[in-house]
Amino acid sequence: MAQSMAETGQLKASKLLNDFQDISFLEIAAIVASSWLLIYVLRKILPYLAARGPSQLRLYLLGAVPIIRLCVLSGAALWIIPLIFNITFHNFLVIAGGASVAIGFAFKDYVSSIIAGVVAIFEKPYRPGDWVKIDGDYGEVRSVGMRSLEIVTPADDVVTIPHDRLWSNNILNANDGAKT
């Protein structure tokens, strides 16, 4: 009995991919081509409309280009995945587990920067107006955000430094909040 349940579980989770002859490569190619074409057209039309519209609209339209591209690519991926994979509950768990690990590794540095940003807000190793040197970058702190801080160098360059450098580098603060 226990062996047959184990075999059934293996059978349910074993067929992750659809059979090769069942995959519609023509449909996948059409989805990829239409997604690419839609992104190409939007990348041409939105800047064109932004250049001819009011300045406030320009900022929104140009900022929308990467978001729309992400939505189109996500939609295409969600459309293609069921064509290639045999989505059952067991297979979904396998795919979700693998995707969770991949997403965890992808966002590891970003989450580390946010946690370091929270630590920086409470510890205050630097404040706007301080002159700091972090890992060879020297300048005046212009702003402190959740993920990073911006410094302006003496050459008037803006350098964005992720807060996760707090974990591994020394911070030299020339004036520590005092007026210079």
Image (cartoon, grey):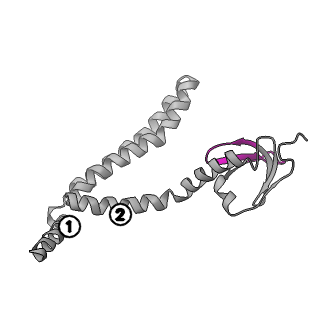
Q: Secondary structure at mark 2?
A: helix
Type of residue at label 1?
Ala
| Magenta-colored span | 142-158
Name the one closer to the observer, 23 or 87. Answer: 87
Please say whether residue 144 is one of the residues in the magenta stretch. Answer: yes
Q: Residue furthest front?
A: 1
Q: Quadrant of residue 14?
A: bottom left
Please provide percent x and percent y for residue 156: 80, 45
For the residues bearing labels 2 and 1, Cβ distance under 8 angstroms: no
Residue appearing at x 65%, y 48% in the figure: 148
Q: Is residue 158 left or right of residue 44?
A: right
Location of the N terminus by quadrant is bottom left
Does residue 169 show up? yes
Is residue 91 positioned above or below 30 on the image?
A: below
Of residues 120 and 19, the one nearer the viewer is: 120
Q: Nearer the viewer, residue 142 or 45?
A: 142
Q: Pointer 1: what residue?
A: 13
Residue at which label 2 appears: 98
Residue 36 in the image: state x and y as whole percent. 37, 48
With respect to residue 95, does 174 lie above or below? above
Mark closer to the chain start, 2 or 1: 1
